[in-house]
Amino acid sequence: MKLPSLFRTASHMRFDIKPRYYDPIKEEIEERTSRIKYELEQEGLLNKSENEGDGIEKRKGLGSGIRGSFAQRGMKPKSTSMISASSVIRTLLFFGMVIGVFGYIYLGPEIFNYMLYAVAVIGGGYYLFRFLKRSKDE
């Protein structure tokens, strides 16, 4: 059972390789064929309609059979939001501890009572606001 923590711990990365068959001879034949088709088009011996579907890169001999193999497929996009629930909780805990330390230095143990009352009032107001908002939506 995992204990709750304030900090994120690094998890292990899984490596999943999907082997692909790479045939350099076949790729070379395709490059030469597309280059010859491109040259015949330039000379006017071959119509462009016969060669549609080939990309410009393939016609110039720059195509690759491994194109796109490094694309990240099936991975979840990272959240780009600056404010997430865990970061807000960590920030509030940090400020609560700082206020508690400085309050203890200046006011003594009474600061913990004040902080408890403040948390109760803010938490009660938050849940009351959510309850009222939810009842208006229904």
Image (tube, helix red, strand yellow):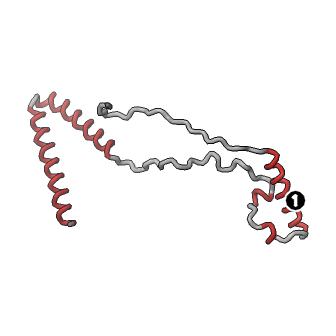
Image-based side of 134 in relation to 87, left or right: left
Quarter of the image holding residue 134?
bottom left
Report the residue at 70% width, 47% height from top: 66
Quarter of the image holding residue 137?
bottom left
Quadrant, the N terminus? top left
Residue on which disc 1 sits:
36
Image-based side of 91 in relation to 14, left or right: left
Report the residue at 17% width, 63% height from top: 135
SS label for mark 1: helix
Residue nearest the observer in this picture, 38 or 101: 38
Position of residue 100 measured from the top left corner of the image (x, y, whole percent) = 18, 33
- Amino acid type, residue under disc 1 in the picture: Ile
Q: Is residue 1 above or below residue 28?
A: above
Position of residue 59 measured from the top left corner of the image (x, y, whole percent) = 80, 59
Report the residue at 27% width, 36% height from top: 94
Position of residue 89 measured from the top left corner of the image (x, y, whole percent) = 28, 41
Image-based side of 131 in relation to 9, left or right: left
Quadrant, the C terminus? bottom left
Q: Is residue 66 above or below residue 39?
A: above
Report the residue at 73% width, 49% height from top: 65
Q: Is residue 109 above or below residue 85?
A: above
